[in-house]
Image: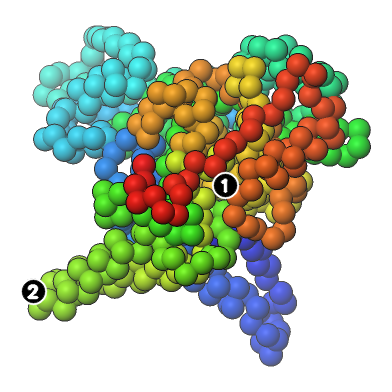
Amino acid sequence: MGRKSSKYSIEGVGSRESASGFPFFKIGFFIAIIGTAIFPFTTIGNKVIRKVGNLLGGEVREIIVEVPVEKIVEVRVEVPVEVHIPVAAPAVRQEKVLANSHAEAIEPMEDVRKMSSSSRIKLSTSVKADKSNGLASADRTDDGSYAIEYKVLIKVPKAAATLAELEKGTPGLGEMLPKLGELTKTAKVSPYFYEIYKNKVDRVKRDATKMKSLLSRHNFFDLQTVLNMTAPNGRKVMIMQADMDVVSDGSDGDRLAKMPESIVNSTYYQPSTSYFWKKQTSTPNPMVAGYTTRVKKGKAELANPATTSARKTWLKDRLKMLETKIQDMKYFSYLVAEYDPFIVIPISMLTNMSDKHAPKVGDYAVVIYKDKLYPCIVGDGGPTFKVGEASLRMAKELNKRAGIYSRPVSDLSVTYLVFPNSRNRDKSAPDYTMWRTKCSELLKEIGGLSAHYQLHEWTNKFPKKDDATTR
C-alpha cells in the first residue's frame, strides 16, 4: 500500500434533455470504471488484497482482481444477527474451500464441523422428525421433507465508552492519562466501530452461504472500541482498543541495502508501505532485483508460443503491476516493519476525507500496553474488517516472542491513541526522536502524562553501512 488513496464523488450535471450540454455523467461514469479497474494495480490496492488473504490463513498468490471501492455507511448492526441458510438434501458434494487446505471435496456438514473446530465456534446439532400426510414416493421429491438448516448466530458487542470499561482492557489507563476520564464523558462511539463489525458480519454471511471457512471467534471479537474524543482546546483524538497482529512489509535501500534472498525472491513479501518518501541516495532498493527476475520470467513465458491466450492476458497485467512497483522502488523509500515502529489502520479510515476524527497516513499515534507507552505513526493501511495491527518492531517490543506468524498480544488489552491531522506535510525518513517529541506534545494537548510515566525511546537498529549482515 505505498500510494496515496483518494475518494471521488461524481454527481450528474444537467439532464438528458440538454443534449448540447457537456456530457459530465458519461465522463464521470467512464472515470469510475477506469478507477475500479486500476485500483488493484496500485500499491495500496494490491496490498489490501494481500492482507485479506493473509488474514484468512490461506495461500496468497499474485492474482490481479477487481476490488470495489468500499463506501462507509454509518449503520448500527442489530444484535443478535442470524444467518439462516437452508440446504436441501440429499447433500451435494462441494469443493472444500477451507484455508490452508487442498483436500478433496467432502460433505457440506462435515465441512461445517471442521470449520467449527478450527475457528473455535460452538456447533450444536439436532434432528426434528414430524409425521407427513404424504406417501414416501411424494415426500422423496419434496426438498422440504428432508432438509438441513445451517444457522450462524452472532452477538455483536457494544463499544467500551467509559473509563471503567476502557480500564478493563488496559488497567491503570486513567492513572497514565489523568484527563482521560473527563474526555470520555463527552466521547462518542465512532461510526467505524459499527462499520467494522458490520463488515465482519457481512463477511460471515458471504462465507457461510458459500460453505467456506468462517472468521474465527478470536478474529471476530478483536475490537473493544473506537471512540472519538475532543479535548477542550479542540484537539481531536481517536482511541481504539484491540489485540495486536503483526505486519512485516516494507523496504528502503537507503537504510537497508541488503535483505535475505528468501525475502527478495518472495511473492508474498510486500516491498512498500502506505507511508513513503523520496529516496535520498543512489543505493538501489534490494527488492528491485527479485522483481526484475520475475519480470524476465514473465516476458519469457509471454513470448512462448505454447502459452495460452488467457494466460498471456494475465501475464500482461501482472508484468504491468511488477514494472510499476519497480519504478516506485527506484524513486521512493518505505518503512521497514522489522526496524520501524508503526501501526496499521483500516483503509476505509485513511481514505475518508469527511470524518475529522479519521486518521491519515503519517498521523502520530501512541500505543499503550500494560504500563508502557510507545510513540509511533500510522504507517500502513489494512482490511476494513479489523483493527489492531502493528509493525514487527513494535510487536517485539511488546512481546519478545512475537514473530511474523505469532501475534504479540491476543487479549483486547492494547490501547491505540491516534491524533488525526497531526502528520507532517512533508514526508521524510523516520526520526524516532522527533516522533517522541511530537507525541509528547500531542499528549499534553489532551491533559498530559502522569509524572510516573514517560514515552518509550526508540533506538536505530538498522545495520551500519559497512555491515554486510542483515537480520
Observer-nearest of 98 and 424 = 424
Q: Is residue 99 left or right of residue 357?
A: left
**Residue lying furthest front:** 466
Marks 1 and 2 sit apart, C-alpha to C-alpha, by 44 Å
Q: Quadrant of the C terminus?
A: top left
Residue at (52% x, 33% y) in the render: 394
Q: Amino acid at mark 2?
A: Ala
Q: Position of residue 285 (x, y in %)?
A: 41, 62
Q: Amino acid at mark 1?
A: Gly
Query: In the rendered image, which residue does mark 2 sit on?
Result: 306
Observer-nearest of 179 and 226 = 179
Q: Residue 20, relative to residue 325: is it above or below?
A: below
Q: Is residue 235 left or right of residue 304?
A: right
Q: Position of residue 217 (x, y in %)?
A: 42, 21
Q: Is residue 148 visible?
A: no
Query: In the rendered image, which residue does mark 1 sit on?
Result: 379
